[in-house]
Image (tube, rainbow, N blue to C red):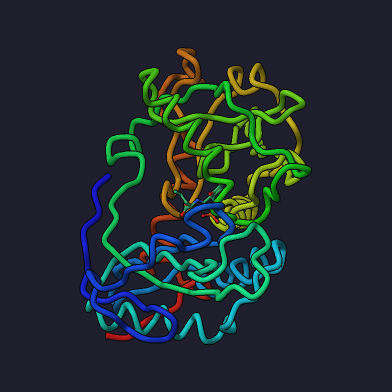
Amino acid sequence: MALTPTNFIWMDGKLVPWEKANVHVLTHTLHYGMGVFEGIRCYKTVKGPAIFRLQDHMQRLENSAKFVGIELPYSVEELIKGVRETIKANKIEECYIRPIAFYGYGIMGLDPEGSKVNVAIAVWPWGTYLGEEGLEKGIRAKISPWLRIHPRILPPQAKVVANYANSILAKVDALRSGYNEAILLNIDGNVAEGPGENVFIVKDGKLISPPASSGALVGITRDSIIKIASDEGISFEEYDFTPNELYAADEAFFTGTAAEVTPIREVDGKPIGGGKRGPITEKLQQIFFNTVRGKEPKYEFWLDYVGK
Ligand code: PY5
Protein backbone atom coordinates (compact mmCIF):
# COMPACT_ATOMS: atom_id res chain seq x y z
CA MET A 1 0.00 0.00 0.00
CA ALA A 2 1.85 3.07 -1.24
CA LEU A 3 2.02 6.17 0.94
CA THR A 4 0.50 9.46 -0.13
CA PRO A 5 2.79 12.15 1.30
CA THR A 6 1.47 15.22 3.07
CA ASN A 7 3.45 18.41 3.74
CA PHE A 8 4.65 18.27 7.34
CA ILE A 9 5.58 15.74 9.99
CA TRP A 10 5.86 16.61 13.68
CA MET A 11 9.30 15.56 14.91
CA ASP A 12 10.32 16.14 18.50
CA GLY A 13 8.07 19.16 18.86
CA LYS A 14 8.69 20.79 15.48
CA LEU A 15 6.93 20.54 12.15
CA VAL A 16 9.41 19.53 9.46
CA PRO A 17 8.81 19.06 5.73
CA TRP A 18 7.73 15.48 4.89
CA GLU A 19 10.88 14.70 2.89
CA LYS A 20 13.14 15.99 5.67
CA ALA A 21 11.59 13.81 8.39
CA ASN A 22 14.50 11.36 8.37
CA VAL A 23 16.53 9.37 10.90
CA HIS A 24 20.07 7.98 10.95
CA VAL A 25 20.58 4.40 9.76
CA LEU A 26 21.98 3.56 13.20
CA THR A 27 18.70 4.41 14.90
CA HIS A 28 18.40 1.87 17.75
CA THR A 29 14.75 0.94 17.05
CA LEU A 30 15.49 0.23 13.37
CA HIS A 31 17.83 -2.55 14.52
CA TYR A 32 16.02 -4.08 17.48
CA GLY A 33 12.37 -3.07 17.26
CA MET A 34 12.00 -1.46 20.67
CA GLY A 35 9.63 1.40 19.98
CA VAL A 36 5.93 2.08 20.50
CA PHE A 37 3.35 3.52 18.16
CA GLU A 38 -0.31 4.32 17.69
CA GLY A 39 -2.78 4.28 14.83
CA ILE A 40 -5.56 6.85 14.94
CA ARG A 41 -8.05 8.10 12.37
CA CYS A 42 -9.38 11.54 11.68
CA TYR A 43 -12.62 11.77 9.71
CA LYS A 44 -14.28 14.51 7.72
CA THR A 45 -17.43 15.84 9.39
CA VAL A 46 -19.67 18.85 8.83
CA LYS A 47 -17.87 20.52 11.73
CA GLY A 48 -14.45 19.95 10.15
CA PRO A 49 -11.93 17.17 10.77
CA ALA A 50 -12.70 15.05 13.85
CA ILE A 51 -10.20 12.71 15.51
CA PHE A 52 -11.71 9.52 16.88
CA ARG A 53 -10.88 8.79 20.54
CA LEU A 54 -7.63 10.74 20.48
CA GLN A 55 -7.21 10.86 24.25
CA ASP A 56 -7.65 7.07 24.52
CA HIS A 57 -5.09 6.42 21.81
CA MET A 58 -2.51 8.75 23.34
CA GLN A 59 -3.13 7.25 26.75
CA ARG A 60 -2.46 3.83 25.23
CA LEU A 61 0.78 5.15 23.69
CA GLU A 62 1.88 6.30 27.13
CA ASN A 63 0.91 2.94 28.63
CA SER A 64 2.72 1.02 25.89
CA ALA A 65 5.86 3.07 26.54
CA LYS A 66 5.62 2.54 30.29
CA PHE A 67 5.18 -1.18 29.75
CA VAL A 68 8.51 -1.54 27.96
CA GLY A 69 10.41 1.11 29.90
CA ILE A 70 10.51 3.83 27.25
CA GLU A 71 10.42 7.26 28.88
CA LEU A 72 8.29 9.48 26.69
CA PRO A 73 9.70 13.01 26.59
CA TYR A 74 6.18 14.41 26.04
CA SER A 75 2.98 14.25 28.04
CA VAL A 76 -0.29 12.93 26.62
CA GLU A 77 -1.51 16.55 26.46
CA GLU A 78 1.55 17.67 24.49
CA LEU A 79 1.13 14.78 22.06
CA ILE A 80 -2.56 15.59 21.60
CA LYS A 81 -1.55 19.17 20.81
CA GLY A 82 1.03 17.82 18.37
CA VAL A 83 -1.59 15.78 16.51
CA ARG A 84 -3.91 18.77 16.16
CA GLU A 85 -1.04 20.98 15.01
CA THR A 86 0.04 18.43 12.40
CA ILE A 87 -3.45 18.04 10.96
CA LYS A 88 -3.91 21.80 10.79
CA ALA A 89 -0.52 22.39 9.16
CA ASN A 90 -1.31 19.80 6.51
CA LYS A 91 -4.80 21.24 5.86
CA ILE A 92 -6.12 17.71 5.64
CA GLU A 93 -9.77 16.77 6.27
CA GLU A 94 -9.46 13.02 6.63
CA CYS A 95 -6.34 11.04 7.50
CA TYR A 96 -4.63 8.27 9.37
CA ILE A 97 -2.42 9.47 12.24
CA ARG A 98 0.75 7.63 13.20
CA PRO A 99 2.55 8.72 16.37
CA ILE A 100 5.73 6.76 17.06
CA ALA A 101 8.27 6.90 19.89
CA PHE A 102 11.62 5.24 19.29
CA TYR A 103 15.17 5.01 20.56
CA GLY A 104 17.24 7.26 18.34
CA TYR A 105 20.86 7.48 17.29
CA GLY A 106 23.77 7.13 19.70
CA ILE A 107 23.63 3.77 21.51
CA MET A 108 24.04 0.44 19.73
CA GLY A 109 24.13 -2.14 22.52
CA LEU A 110 20.89 -3.86 23.46
CA ASP A 111 20.69 -1.88 26.70
CA PRO A 112 19.00 1.34 25.59
CA GLU A 113 20.02 3.12 28.82
CA GLY A 114 20.99 6.68 27.96
CA SER A 115 19.46 6.53 24.49
CA LYS A 116 17.53 9.47 23.16
CA VAL A 117 13.80 8.86 22.74
CA ASN A 118 12.51 10.52 19.58
CA VAL A 119 8.84 11.08 18.87
CA ALA A 120 7.21 11.70 15.51
CA ILE A 121 3.62 12.24 14.41
CA ALA A 122 2.80 11.74 10.74
CA VAL A 123 -0.56 12.04 9.00
CA TRP A 124 -1.53 10.88 5.55
CA PRO A 125 -4.68 10.00 3.64
CA TRP A 126 -5.37 6.31 4.10
CA GLY A 127 -8.41 4.72 2.51
CA THR A 128 -10.12 1.51 3.48
CA TYR A 129 -7.50 -0.87 4.87
CA LEU A 130 -9.07 -4.11 3.66
CA GLY A 131 -10.67 -2.70 0.53
CA GLU A 132 -13.87 -0.79 -0.15
CA GLU A 133 -15.51 -3.96 -1.43
CA GLY A 134 -14.51 -5.82 1.74
CA LEU A 135 -16.54 -3.39 3.86
CA GLU A 136 -19.69 -4.39 2.04
CA LYS A 137 -19.11 -7.93 0.90
CA GLY A 138 -16.74 -9.12 3.61
CA ILE A 139 -13.22 -10.46 3.31
CA ARG A 140 -11.69 -13.94 3.20
CA ALA A 141 -9.49 -14.88 6.14
CA LYS A 142 -7.07 -17.70 6.81
CA ILE A 143 -6.14 -19.22 10.17
CA SER A 144 -2.45 -18.46 10.32
CA PRO A 145 0.31 -21.02 10.87
CA TRP A 146 1.93 -18.22 12.95
CA LEU A 147 0.76 -17.94 16.54
CA ARG A 148 0.02 -14.65 18.26
CA ILE A 149 2.90 -13.57 20.54
CA HIS A 150 2.61 -15.00 24.03
CA PRO A 151 2.74 -12.53 26.98
CA ARG A 152 5.91 -14.25 28.21
CA ILE A 153 7.60 -13.39 24.91
CA LEU A 154 6.49 -9.84 24.11
CA PRO A 155 3.73 -7.73 25.69
CA PRO A 156 0.63 -8.18 23.51
CA GLN A 157 -1.22 -5.31 25.21
CA ALA A 158 1.42 -2.77 24.19
CA LYS A 159 1.78 -1.53 20.63
CA VAL A 160 5.46 -2.37 20.44
CA VAL A 161 7.17 -2.13 17.04
CA ALA A 162 8.72 -5.61 17.39
CA ASN A 163 5.28 -7.22 17.87
CA TYR A 164 4.50 -6.37 14.27
CA ALA A 165 7.16 -8.72 12.88
CA ASN A 166 4.76 -11.47 14.03
CA SER A 167 1.85 -9.63 12.39
CA ILE A 168 3.73 -9.20 9.10
CA LEU A 169 4.55 -12.92 8.91
CA ALA A 170 0.88 -13.80 9.40
CA LYS A 171 -0.39 -11.14 6.98
CA VAL A 172 2.04 -12.06 4.20
CA ASP A 173 1.31 -15.77 4.59
CA ALA A 174 -2.44 -15.10 4.23
CA LEU A 175 -1.98 -12.84 1.20
CA ARG A 176 0.41 -15.24 -0.55
CA SER A 177 -2.07 -18.06 0.07
CA GLY A 178 -4.78 -16.11 -1.73
CA TYR A 179 -6.66 -14.71 1.28
CA ASN A 180 -7.22 -11.11 2.33
CA GLU A 181 -6.22 -11.37 5.98
CA ALA A 182 -4.92 -13.73 8.67
CA ILE A 183 -6.44 -14.80 11.97
CA LEU A 184 -3.89 -15.76 14.61
CA LEU A 185 -4.48 -18.38 17.28
CA ASN A 186 -2.70 -18.32 20.63
CA ILE A 187 -0.58 -21.17 21.98
CA ASP A 188 -3.71 -22.78 23.49
CA GLY A 189 -5.27 -23.04 20.04
CA ASN A 190 -7.91 -20.40 20.65
CA VAL A 191 -8.61 -17.46 18.38
CA ALA A 192 -6.66 -14.35 19.39
CA GLU A 193 -7.00 -11.73 16.66
CA GLY A 194 -5.94 -10.52 13.23
CA PRO A 195 -2.45 -9.12 12.55
CA GLY A 196 -3.83 -5.61 13.20
CA GLU A 197 -7.46 -6.20 14.05
CA ASN A 198 -9.67 -7.65 16.76
CA VAL A 199 -12.08 -10.45 15.91
CA PHE A 200 -15.76 -10.68 16.80
CA ILE A 201 -18.24 -13.44 16.09
CA VAL A 202 -22.03 -13.43 16.29
CA LYS A 203 -23.77 -16.60 17.44
CA ASP A 204 -27.51 -16.85 18.09
CA GLY A 205 -27.80 -13.07 18.24
CA LYS A 206 -24.97 -12.70 20.77
CA LEU A 207 -21.75 -10.84 20.14
CA ILE A 208 -18.54 -12.59 21.27
CA SER A 209 -14.87 -11.57 21.25
CA PRO A 210 -11.79 -13.19 22.80
CA PRO A 211 -10.62 -11.65 26.10
CA ALA A 212 -7.31 -9.85 26.67
CA SER A 213 -5.93 -13.10 28.09
CA SER A 214 -6.13 -14.58 24.57
CA GLY A 215 -3.21 -12.32 23.68
CA ALA A 216 -5.32 -9.97 21.56
CA LEU A 217 -4.56 -6.28 21.86
CA VAL A 218 -7.76 -4.98 23.39
CA GLY A 219 -8.54 -2.40 20.75
CA ILE A 220 -10.23 0.96 20.99
CA THR A 221 -12.49 0.16 18.02
CA ARG A 222 -13.40 -3.10 19.77
CA ASP A 223 -14.33 -1.14 22.87
CA SER A 224 -16.44 1.27 20.79
CA ILE A 225 -18.31 -1.62 19.13
CA ILE A 226 -19.03 -3.24 22.50
CA LYS A 227 -20.50 0.03 23.77
CA ILE A 228 -22.57 0.56 20.62
CA ALA A 229 -23.82 -3.05 20.75
CA SER A 230 -24.83 -2.73 24.38
CA ASP A 231 -26.75 0.49 23.61
CA GLU A 232 -28.51 -1.40 20.81
CA GLY A 233 -29.52 -4.18 23.20
CA ILE A 234 -27.14 -6.72 21.66
CA SER A 235 -25.57 -8.79 24.41
CA PHE A 236 -21.81 -9.16 24.46
CA GLU A 237 -19.70 -11.89 25.99
CA GLU A 238 -15.97 -12.20 26.22
CA TYR A 239 -14.63 -15.74 26.07
CA ASP A 240 -12.12 -17.94 24.29
CA PHE A 241 -13.27 -19.80 21.23
CA THR A 242 -11.65 -22.25 18.83
CA PRO A 243 -11.40 -22.06 15.03
CA ASN A 244 -14.30 -24.56 14.90
CA GLU A 245 -16.55 -22.14 16.77
CA LEU A 246 -15.44 -19.44 14.36
CA TYR A 247 -16.32 -21.61 11.33
CA ALA A 248 -19.74 -22.29 12.91
CA ALA A 249 -20.49 -18.63 13.70
CA ASP A 250 -23.47 -16.85 12.16
CA GLU A 251 -21.38 -13.76 11.46
CA ALA A 252 -17.80 -12.62 11.98
CA PHE A 253 -16.00 -9.33 11.61
CA PHE A 254 -12.75 -7.50 12.28
CA THR A 255 -12.39 -4.19 14.11
CA GLY A 256 -9.44 -1.83 14.15
CA THR A 257 -8.51 1.77 13.47
CA ALA A 258 -7.13 0.89 10.04
CA ALA A 259 -9.64 -1.90 9.28
CA GLU A 260 -12.60 -0.02 10.86
CA VAL A 261 -15.42 -2.62 10.89
CA THR A 262 -14.82 -5.22 8.18
CA PRO A 263 -17.05 -8.29 7.79
CA ILE A 264 -15.37 -11.69 7.45
CA ARG A 265 -17.31 -13.74 4.92
CA GLU A 266 -15.13 -16.82 4.80
CA VAL A 267 -12.47 -18.52 6.94
CA ASP A 268 -10.21 -21.21 5.44
CA GLY A 269 -12.57 -21.53 2.48
CA LYS A 270 -15.60 -22.09 4.73
CA PRO A 271 -18.39 -19.53 4.40
CA ILE A 272 -19.35 -17.82 7.67
CA GLY A 273 -23.13 -17.84 8.05
CA GLY A 274 -24.50 -16.95 4.64
CA GLY A 275 -21.04 -16.16 3.28
CA LYS A 276 -21.76 -12.44 3.26
CA ARG A 277 -22.02 -9.51 5.66
CA GLY A 278 -24.50 -10.44 8.38
CA PRO A 279 -27.30 -8.19 9.69
CA ILE A 280 -25.77 -7.50 13.14
CA THR A 281 -22.40 -6.72 11.55
CA GLU A 282 -24.10 -4.36 9.12
CA LYS A 283 -25.98 -2.56 11.87
CA LEU A 284 -22.90 -2.09 14.07
CA GLN A 285 -20.84 -1.06 11.06
CA GLN A 286 -23.41 1.54 10.07
CA ILE A 287 -23.57 3.07 13.55
CA PHE A 288 -19.77 3.03 13.74
CA PHE A 289 -19.36 4.93 10.46
CA ASN A 290 -22.05 7.41 11.43
CA THR A 291 -20.29 7.89 14.76
CA VAL A 292 -16.84 8.64 13.33
CA ARG A 293 -18.38 10.98 10.76
CA GLY A 294 -20.11 13.01 13.47
CA LYS A 295 -23.62 11.82 12.67
CA GLU A 296 -24.37 10.16 16.01
CA PRO A 297 -24.82 12.85 18.69
CA LYS A 298 -24.86 10.11 21.32
CA TYR A 299 -21.22 9.29 20.64
CA GLU A 300 -19.94 12.76 19.89
CA PHE A 301 -17.93 12.64 23.11
CA TRP A 302 -15.53 10.32 21.26
CA LEU A 303 -14.72 13.01 18.69
CA ASP A 304 -12.07 15.66 18.94
CA TYR A 305 -12.74 18.43 16.47
CA VAL A 306 -9.60 20.00 15.04
CA GLY A 307 -11.30 23.18 13.89
CA LYS A 308 -11.37 24.50 10.36
N1 PY5 B 1 -4.84 -5.76 17.33
C1 PY5 B 1 -3.66 -5.35 16.84
C2 PY5 B 1 -2.50 -6.28 16.90
C3 PY5 B 1 -3.53 -4.08 16.31
O1 PY5 B 1 -2.37 -3.67 15.82
C4 PY5 B 1 -4.66 -3.23 16.26
C5 PY5 B 1 -4.55 -1.88 15.63
C6 PY5 B 1 -5.88 -3.70 16.77
C7 PY5 B 1 -5.92 -4.97 17.31
C8 PY5 B 1 -7.10 -2.83 16.82
O2 PY5 B 1 -6.92 -1.81 17.76
P1 PY5 B 1 -7.62 -0.40 17.65
O3 PY5 B 1 -9.06 -0.65 17.46
O4 PY5 B 1 -7.33 0.24 18.94
O5 PY5 B 1 -7.01 0.30 16.48
N2 PY5 B 1 -3.68 -1.84 14.53
C9 PY5 B 1 -3.19 -0.62 13.96
C10 PY5 B 1 -4.31 0.25 13.39
O6 PY5 B 1 -4.08 1.42 13.24
C11 PY5 B 1 -2.13 -0.91 12.93
C12 PY5 B 1 -2.57 -1.64 11.72
C13 PY5 B 1 -1.53 -1.78 10.67
O7 PY5 B 1 -5.39 -0.25 13.11
Q: List x then y, in percent, for residue 84.
A: 39, 82
The structure residue drawn at horizontal position 53% and vertical position 31%, both measured from the top left corner, is 252
Quarter-wise, where is residue 145 in the image? top right
Can residue 32 be seen here? The reply is yes
The structure residue drawn at horizontal position 55% and vertical position 30%, both measured from the top left corner, is 183
Q: List x then y, in percent, for residue 223.
A: 62, 56
* Foreground residue among 100 and 107: 107
Q: List x then y, in percent, for residue 139.
A: 39, 29
The image shows residue 304, relative to residue 42, as above or below, that is: below
Q: How many marks?
A: 0
Give the quarter of the figure containing the C terminus.
bottom left
The structure residue drawn at horizontal position 52% and vertical position 61%, both measured from the top left corner, is 28
The image shows residue 112, relative to residue 55, as above or below, that is: above
Quarter-wise, where is residue 153 in the image? top right
On the picture, is 229 further left or further right than 69? left
Give the quarter of the figure containing the N terminus.
top left
On the picture, is 125 further left or further right than 59? left
The image shows residue 51, relative to residue 35, as above or below, that is: below
The structure residue drawn at horizontal position 50% and vertical position 80%, both measured from the top left corner, is 79
Residue farthest toward the top in the current orientation of the protein? 269
Q: List x then y, in percent, for residue 192.
A: 65, 35
Can residue 299 be seen here? The reply is no
